[in-house]
Amino acid sequence: MGKIILVVLGLLLVWWILKSYRRRVDGGGTRPPTGAGEDMVRCEQCGVHLPRSESIAAQGRFFCSAEHQREHQSRWSP
Ligand SMILES: [Zn+2]
């Protein structure tokens, strides 16, 4: 009898973990940005995220520093 209860509890646990995991995956992408925070942009060279006001914009791309802007341009220009 005790064994059956353990099995049922185990199944419930697995079901609960799957359910909470799926909810976390679903909610992750659709969550709206919180607060009145600044736009975050991504450096095209190293991929770091930083506030738009601290980034360097060039040709519609953003960079964390002038150095990375130069590196990116020298890499992608012929
Ligand atoms: Zn960078």
Image (cartoon, rainbow, N blue to C red):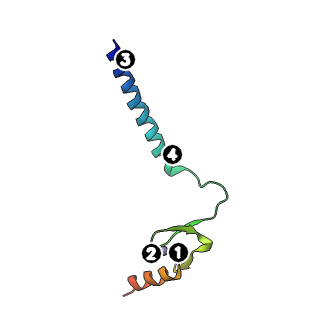
Classify residue 30 as left or right of residue 15: right
For the point 47% across and 84% down, which residue is it? 70
Q: Residues within 10 Å of mark 3 (few under 14, many from 20)?
A: few
Task: Select label 3 or label 2 by which is in front.
Answer: 3
* Distance Cα–Cα, label 3 vs label 1: 57 Å
Q: Position of residue 50 (x, y in %)?
A: 56, 68
Determine which quarter of the picture holds residue 77. Answer: bottom left
* Distance Cα–Cα, label 4 vs label 1: 29 Å
Secondary structure under tag 4 reads helix
Tell me which numbered mark, 1 or 2, is placed earlier along the sequence: 2
Question: Does the residue tagged 1 have its C-beta within 8 Å of any atom of ligand 1?
Answer: yes
Task: Select label 3 or label 4 by which is in front.
Answer: 3
Image mark for residue 45: 2
Amino acid type at circle 2 is Gln
Determine which residue is flagged by label 1.
64
Q: Position of residue 23 (x, y in %)?
A: 47, 40
Q: Residues within 10 Å of mark 1 (few under 14, many from 20)?
A: many
Q: Nearer the viewer, residue 37 or 61?
A: 37
Image mark for residue 5: 3
Tell me which numbered mark, 3 or 1, is placed earlier along the sequence: 3
Question: Does the residue tagged 2 have its C-beta within 8 Å of any atom of ligand 1?
Answer: yes
Contact flag, marks 1 and 2 (Cβ < 8 Å): yes
Amino acid type at circle 4 is Gly
* Distance Cα–Cα, label 3 vs label 2: 56 Å
Determine which residue is flagged by label 4.
27
Q: Nearer the viewer, residue 40 or 9?
A: 9
